[in-house]
Amino acid sequence: MLIRKSIPSAIVALIALGGAPAAYAQGVFTLSSPDFKDGERLPTKFAGNNKSSPNCVGENISPALSWANPPEGTKSYAFLIFDIDGRPPGGVSHWVAYGIPPSVTGFAEGEVSKPSTKYVGGQSTMKLSTYFGPCTPPGPPHHYIFTLMASDLEPNAFKEGLTREQLFKELDGHAKAATSLVVTFSKQ
């Protein structure tokens, strides 16, 4: 077995014995979905379903989401879905949620399209506390950022109805890490 001299001998010994230092064992804080990959187009069923708008072509089903390897000391999570290209210059918040307990490691498909005891609902641009999918106008695809933040605040530290901007103020100095997926959407 070839071992480079630049690897400290203590690490080599731990690896040889089947272990690894704690800093390497935890892994990277990640967000994923079985419904799409980072950089892909969001499937149409996850788009908004406001039938009074010709831009809302989906079923408004929230995608399945899961996460792993939160940073040490995580006491709650916050989740945002943001359309950076919508309603310039401010963008559109499609979902604002927080107070998610550390025991929660994901949401099933359709779960956050309705209220849940697993999260505290904030206030999206549409004044909703639940997921509302893209209703992208004609033109180039919009970019939707799904962001999960780990916090050192207890789940009950937040009041209901916070906007994205208000949540940022609450998390200032308390966000431990964030992980994101970016997808695109446009009508086909």
Image (spheres, grey):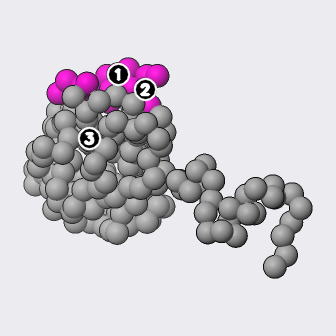
Q: How many marks?
A: 3
Amino acid at pointer 3: Ile
* Residue 188 visible from this viewpoint: no
Q: Which residue is mark 3?
A: 100
Q: Is residue 173 left or right of residue 101?
A: right
Residue pictured at 63% horizontal, 53% vertical: 21
Magenta residues span 157-175
Few, some or many residues within 10 Å of mark 3 (<14, 14–19, 20+) = many
Whichever of labels 1 and 3 marks the residue nearer the N terminus, that label is 3
Residue pictured at 46% horizontal, 22% vertical: 173
For residue 122, what is the image quadrant? top left
Q: CA distance from mark 2 to mark 3?
A: 14 Å
For residue 40, what is the image quadrant? bottom left
Is residue 163 highlighted in magenta? Answer: yes
Q: CA distance from mark 1 to mark 3?
A: 14 Å
Q: Position of residue 129 (x, y in %)?
A: 16, 38
* Residue 130 visible from this viewpoint: yes
The answer to whether the residue labelled 2 contacts the one labelled 1, judged by CB atoms less than 8 Å apart, is yes
Q: Which residue is mark 1?
A: 170
Q: Is residue 98 left or right of residue 86?
A: left
Q: Which residue is mark 2?
A: 174
